[in-house]
Every structure is written in C-alpha cells, then in structure tokens.
Amino acid sequence: MRLRSLLFVPGDRPERFDKALSSGADAVILDLEDSVSAQNKQAARDAVRDFVVRRTADATLVVRINPLASPAFEDDLAALADVSPFAIMLPKAEGAPSVRQLASRFSTAVPILPIATETPAAIFEIGSYRDVAPHLCGLTWGAEDLSAAMGAATAREIDGRYTAPYELARSLVLFGAHAASIPAIETVYPDFRNLDGLVAYAARARRDGFSGMMAIHPNQVEAINRAFTPDAEEIAWAEKIVTAFAASSDSGVIQLEGRMVDLPHLKLAKRILEVAKMSDE
C-alpha cells in the first residue's frame, strides 16, 4: 500500500469524512485527539466508529487515538474494539514499548503508525522501532507537541524552517524508519493556503528520503501526491540505469552517457521504478 498522502479530518466533523475520501488522498486520518475538544470526544468516537464500519472495505482509514497515558485512551479502544481500520495512529509514542502496549490491546493485528517525536523521552527511543517493525505501517513525527513540552518559544525560524533541535528530531525519524524498513512519513505543512511553500516542503521531504506526507486540508493532497510520485523523466532515467546494469551484469561500476554510475545508483533506480509501479496500482 502506497502512503504518499494522509489527510487529517476531525473525528467530530462527520460531514467532512466523505469529502476527505474524495480528495485523492491515499489514506484519511480520522482524528480523535488534538482536533477534537474534550466535550466532543464521545460524539467523535461514535462518528468514527460508524464510518469505519461502513467504509473500511473500500477506503484506507487511519484512526488517530488519544495517547496511552491519557484518560481518553481506554474509551477510544472501547469504541474501536470490534472494528478494523487500516491502521491506528499513536500520538506521543515512546518507542517499541508503546507499540507493544498498544498492539497487546487488540485481538487481531492492526498496523500502527506512531508519531515518534512528541515528548523529550521519545527522541531517545526512535531507534527501537526496528524491534517492532512487523507491527508498523510507517513512522512519522511532529514538532508542535515537542516544542511545547520543552517550553520552546517556537520550533521554526523566521523563514519557516525548523530550528536545529527539531531538524534533529526529523532526521532521527527518517533514519529510524529506514532502519526498520518502513515508510517515513513527513509531518504536515500548516500554511494550507501557501501551495508554493507546500510544493517546496514536499519536494525537500522526498529528496531527503521520506516516502509520503500528512496533510491538513484537501487542497494539499494533489501537490503532495505529485511530489511523491516519480515523473516521466525520473522513470526514464531509472529504466536506463537498470537496463545498462543488466547488460553489464558482472560490473559494479558502468559508464552511461558520459557519467560513471555505480551500485547505489542502481538501487535508487530500482526504488524509483518500484514506487512508480505502486503509484499506478
């Protein structure tokens, strides 16, 4: 399953659920956590449960529950006890122990998508996700909860870039996901009206090795999908690399169009073709 774009929708806004599905997002995240007020939690659980029951067979639905230590966690699990969304998003996860704790509460296996950087302690556990990789469908991150927990004035520079501590958190999630051989999912771009900024942000994420990104507005989905889908030029380059190495199967380095190409280029080319194939399915 390709997860290029994952679109958040508040769990207490059921009138938006079908619109989210029609956005073109690879997955829709039905949120029971931050976007839902305390007084609306139960209504959100009821709406999400009903929608998952009706649409899980034909839609990729992820439910973001409340954190393990929160009072709302048990009520979330009760609401989801006998339904099967595509995955459960776990906020404020703190490594493999959090994943094991959540997985143990489901009678059938449900993939988990941890948000891996929302507490200071979580940063030191990112490398442990490879120990629970079979339980995971990806790994993602966010800076807002972490910066709030640390009392930081902001997580961003004036130009919108992350400050050094939060760039580190982002990088660790990227490495942690690849160490576990699972998709690395970039965090949201909050200025949903700035599509040029979104395009640049998503392009940077793909350049760095993320395979998808979360969205907060349907208008962001098309640009995100495009950013994480190889274009015709990339595919043509990858096909040339694979073909050239196939013709020189005993060589680790070949010359192609006046440039030296080695095995890391072949690995990248095969990855591009794999991603392109998944995008067409």
Image: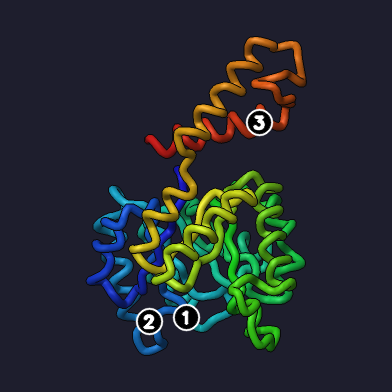
Indicate the secondary structure of the residue bearing disc 3. helix
Q: Residue at x 67, y 76 (%)?
A: 119
**Residue 112 to residue 193: above or below:** above
Cα gap from disc 3 to disc 2, whole angstroms: 46 Å
Q: Position of residue 147 (x, y in %)?
A: 65, 81
Along the polypeptide, which appears first: circle 1 or circle 2?
Answer: 2
Q: Nearer the viewer, mark 3 or mark 2?
A: 3
What residue does disc 2 label?
41
Q: Nearer the viewer, residue 31 or 84?
A: 31
**Residue 281 to residue 78: above or below:** above
What residue does disc 1 label?
72
Q: Are marks 1 and 2 in contact (CB under 8 Å)?
A: yes
Q: Nearer the viewer, residue 95 or 144?
A: 144
Indicate the secondary structure of the residue bearing disc 2. helix
Crowding at dot 2, Cα within 10 Å, few <14 / some 14-19 / many 20+, comes out as many
What residue does disc 3 label?
267
Indicate the amino acid at tag 1. Answer: Ala
Q: Are marks 3 and 1 in contact (CB under 8 Å)?
A: no
Cα gap from disc 1 to disc 2, whole angstroms: 8 Å
Q: Position of residue 264 (x, y in %)?
A: 71, 32
Indicate the amino acid at tag 2. Answer: Lys
Indicate the amino acid at tag 3. Answer: Lys
Along the polypeptide, which appears first: circle 3 or circle 1?
Answer: 1
Residue 135 visible, this orientation = no
Residue 190 visible, this orientation = yes
Q: Position of residue 138 (x, y in %)?
A: 56, 53
Q: Quadrant of the N terminus?
A: top left
